[in-house]
Image: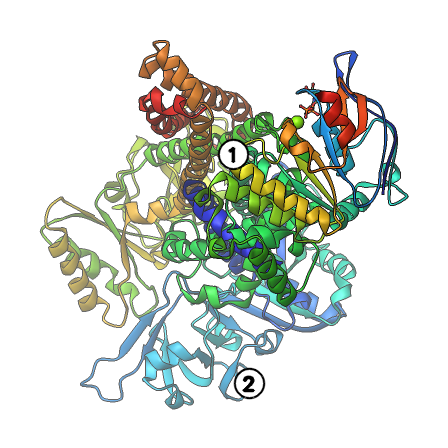
Amino acid sequence: MIFNNLKIAWRSLRRNKVYTGINIIGLAIGIAAVLLIFRMLSFELSFNKDFENYDRIARVVRQDVNASGNRGYTTCLPQPAGDAIESSITGIEKLARVKELWPTLTVPSENSNIPSKKFNVADAETAFFAETPFLNIFDFEWIVGDQAHALDAPGNIVLTKTWAVKCFEDWNQALGKQLLLDNQIPLTVTGVMEDLPENVDFVFPFLASYETLKANPEDYFYSEGWHSCSSNDQMYILLEDAGDWDLMQEAIAGIGAEEYVGRNGTRDHVHSLQPLSDLHFSEQWQNSGTHRISKKRLSILGAIGILILVMACFNFINLATAQSTLRSKEVGVRKTLGSSKMQLTHQFLTETGLIVAAALILGMVISTFCLPLLQHISEVPNELPFLSDYRIIAFLLITGVSVTLLAGLYPALSMSRFRPVEALKSNYSNSQLSGSRLRKSLVVFQFVIAQGLIIAALINIRQLDYIQKIDLGFSDDLVYTFGVQVDSATLHRQSSLKNKLLQIPNIEAVSLSSDQPLSGNTWATNFRYASRPEDEQYAMTMKFCDENYSETYGIEPIAGRWLTASDTMREAVVNMTVVERLGLDSPEDILNQTVRVSGNDLKVVGVTEDFHTHSVRQAYKPLLMTTFKSYYWQAGVKMRPGDLKGTLSAIQQVFDEVLPEQVMDGQFLDESIAEHYGDEERLSATTKGFGFLAILVSCLGLFGLATHAATQRLKEIGVRKVLGATIYHIVGLLSKDFLKLIFIALLVATPIAWYLMRNWLDNFVYRTDMPYGAFIIAGLLAMLVAFLTVSYQSIKAATTSPIKSLRDE
Amino acid sequence: MISLKNIERFYNQGLQKAWVLRDISIDIEEGSFVTIMGPSGSGKTTLLNIIGMLDQPNNGEYYFFDEPVHKFRERKRTELHKHYIGFIFQAYHLIDDLTVYENIETPLLYKNVPRSQRRAIVADILDRFNIVAKKDLFPHQLSGGQQQLVGVARAVVGKPKLLLADEPTGNLHSTQGKIIMDTLAELHKEGITIIQVTHDENNIKYGDRVIELWDGFIKNDLKTAEALSASQ
Ligand SMILES: Nc1ncnc2c1ncn2[C@@H]1O[C@H](COP(=O)(O)OP(=O)(O)O)[C@@H](O)[C@H]1O
Ligand SMILES: [Mg+2]
């Protein structure tokens, strides 16, 4: 029976080539889309899961509540809070303090003639100072060395295999070798471990012992106060029992009950546990990996994938029901020959199954070719063997079966229900299934999705364009930035670096600072104005800049002047937000006033317009800029146009000459700012890509229906032509029905898209007005594409000689 | 074999009933060859479909080998139909996508006859009907008479007890029609019960009984000889 069904299915599919082709291509597109999305989702959802203690590991994090009730989220854990957790909380099997760092690692040359090798930790990577238990909390794959004590002593370092090879050619040679951390701290390799897989949230190149940090407190800002800590100071714990979460949360929340009391007597910091399972998806807390992605974003992606597949199934249902009248005779005959409903259902499902099988194969091919496109919308590694993954195979099987049922069951059931007596009548048109209302609803549904996605894409593009064109308040044009390490050995070389850079002909200005204007860094501290008795209720964001910051980044004071040269904090320049928050009438009012930040009294000498220090998703923050030589980790070079290449290599030359022990790692400012919009860009690419797919799938279905309609109405068209209708009449006649549907779809899609995109735009402090044009463009676009699709068939029908279509009968 | 008691069939047309069959009571012996006649629209096909269990009466009782068909659910009717009844249509109704061989084989598939037996049975039938050479052709490659021959072969391949033929020669010219009727006569001789619908007086003589319908009623129910003499 199965064999016979297959044979019959094969013949009937071959006879209806257009119909079969449309179905296979449509489904294949849907399947390819779902496969790619599944690939992304399974990658993102697999994060950290392979650690053996996945469900018992947590990170201690902190929520900050300021006086105005705003919440802040930080991963920072002050040393004494960590000590309190260690000494007073039971139920913790192991805990490990870590601190993130991005240092330079130098392999000293044994022969003074050969220059030593040095490596920067790349942007995407984060190194750790870590306590030994870190190696036990996570079951890293250990290769060589004494794992139990590898990070016990100051100067211990554990390398990953790649870095061991990088430093010493052969990882076998690494153990016991010497390295230099940031050109000054000697380290001894005490272990080598496997590289971390891609799906974990730490991509550390190496671990230095926490004792090394404690031994060099100034260089790495190690401090033991309750009130000083940075988001780089973190702690991972391993619970004794995975069931203890609630109790443990309660205990952790109790930490610092006395110490974290703000001026108005309420708690302003509360610690909690962030399960390892949340690390990759948290919208609040940073992780040490390359990216986070919210569960919400993942579900949107999943939903889009399923919608596109469902749309492809709808095509199938539409075409199958449209074709079913042509097959009613066959159903009638088979029933008189003794076929049961069940047997007919099987036969039709076999046909669907065959189409789905072909679509699965084609879908796999398409997804393989499209895999590189995923790079535009996600962080998924671009590797091909994804089809050999057993989960993908299982997923394909499940998809195959469910698509067969979803697409095939309804047409199969309704066809098998035809009553033979009626089905065999020659003028039979099936009343249950003429089903044009069902088909119309499905087409409308498809176009609602397609147009919704197009609207979303257009609004996305508009917003992205808007935020990219926002006046940042400073100039990012032709500014090249690179990091400079600051320590006692290099501090005195700062001026020589600046002077030598300035001698390069094409360089206009050079500035050293803690960070560029839009860095996203949040160095904040409490702040007191003039003679006011108390600190202000908000934190003051700070940047440390030299006297040339203003000209390099094009930030002009609107009152007073810029900072003068100084090694330490003396003067301050604030932004307008500070003036407003202080309730002053004009920027002049703050000039020459004294402000107190972090225990230093500074004289305000200038006020600047607000400029963006963070992604434009966020509002302006109060900002104070002052000089402080020891914190100048970044150099900015303003160039003149022309011979960029030559200028860049001249900069490299100066760097190597002045700071031979460091590695230059530079970037143009506009590029680094663009990275802040990566998320928006990916979202925009996603909606564009899937919007396109949705339109494609919908139009395939429309093409099939138009073909069907044209065939069915061939006789009517013939008669009309004999009566004198022109091609335009006929094309209009056939297209009108479809365009009506698309217009209805637009009416449905508009409010839905409006509502969703309004919500999305609300995430931005600076946002474009709702672009009404997007709705009109989406509608026109869909109509145009649909019209082109339909008109091919209409014109073909309209130009067929009426003698032909009226001949038989 | 067949016993119809007060069979009625109507369609609802708006608020009115459109009567197709009224008060039909017939008994048919196993082994008989019955001809149903009557003008177009008098309900012949409807009656045949009811006897063939493809259609259900609105009222009345239908016993097939003493089993109350009117009480059965669809599944049971399909079973009975499948095992006991063969159908021949005026428009042949072969399945376009299947070859002659496969068309004939299809009823056996639905009866779950094993493959080797199927092959033997179909080969036998092809031989009997002299269409072995045509077995791999598709229906559109055959003449009307050949198609109907395949139709008859397909109807009897499952060894039905009852053969229902709705104007089997209606689309054929007389020589082709005669071949079909001779074939039916031969099948009748072998013991199969046949009910045919026809307009053609020449076909009446093959049967032993003539039932004449008129607007849904039975107008006459005569032995063939009586009917022939009555019509003269
Ligand atoms: N589905 C239906 N709905 C309404 N009337 C029907 C339907 N099927 C058949 N009829 C009517 O039943 C009557 C008898 O039809 P039929 O049995 O096919 O007649 P015959 O085969 O004798 O020509 C006709 O008048 C026809 O119009
Ligand atoms: Mg009839």
Q: Is residue A29 left or right of B69 when viewed as pictured?
A: left
Q: Chain of mark 1?
A: A
Asked if residue B30 is positioned above or below residue A431 in the image, the reply reads below
* C-alpha separation, residue under disc 2 versus residue under disc 1: 48 Å
Viewer can see residue B13: yes
Q: In front: B83, or A506?
A: B83
> Which corner quadrant holds the N terminus of chain A?
bottom right
Depth check, mark 2 against mark 1: the one in front is: 1
What residue appears at the point 40 percent right and 53 percent down from the top-left corner? A366
The residue that label 1 is drawn on is A760
Asked if residue B21 is positioned above or below residue A128 in the image, the reply reads above
Residue A263 percent coordinates (x, y): 66, 43
Mark 1 neighbour density, 10 Å: few (under 14) some (14–19) many (20 or more): some
Residue B34 percent coordinates (x, y): 75, 36
Q: Is residue B3 left or right of A483 when viewed as pictured?
A: right
Which residue type does callout 1 highlight? Trp
Mark 1 lies on a secondary structure that is: helix
Residue A692 percent coordinates (x, y): 40, 38
Q: Which disc number belongs to residue A4?
A: none
Quarter of the displayed picture in which ligand 2 can be seen: top right
Mark 2 lies on a secondary structure that is: loop
Q: In front: A186, or B177?
A: B177
Quarter residue B11 falls in: top right
The residue that label 2 is drawn on is A147
Dot 2 or dot 1, earlier in sequence? 2
Mark 2 neighbour density, 10 Å: few (under 14) some (14–19) many (20 or more): some
Viewer can see residue A228: no
Which residue type does callout 2 highlight? Gln
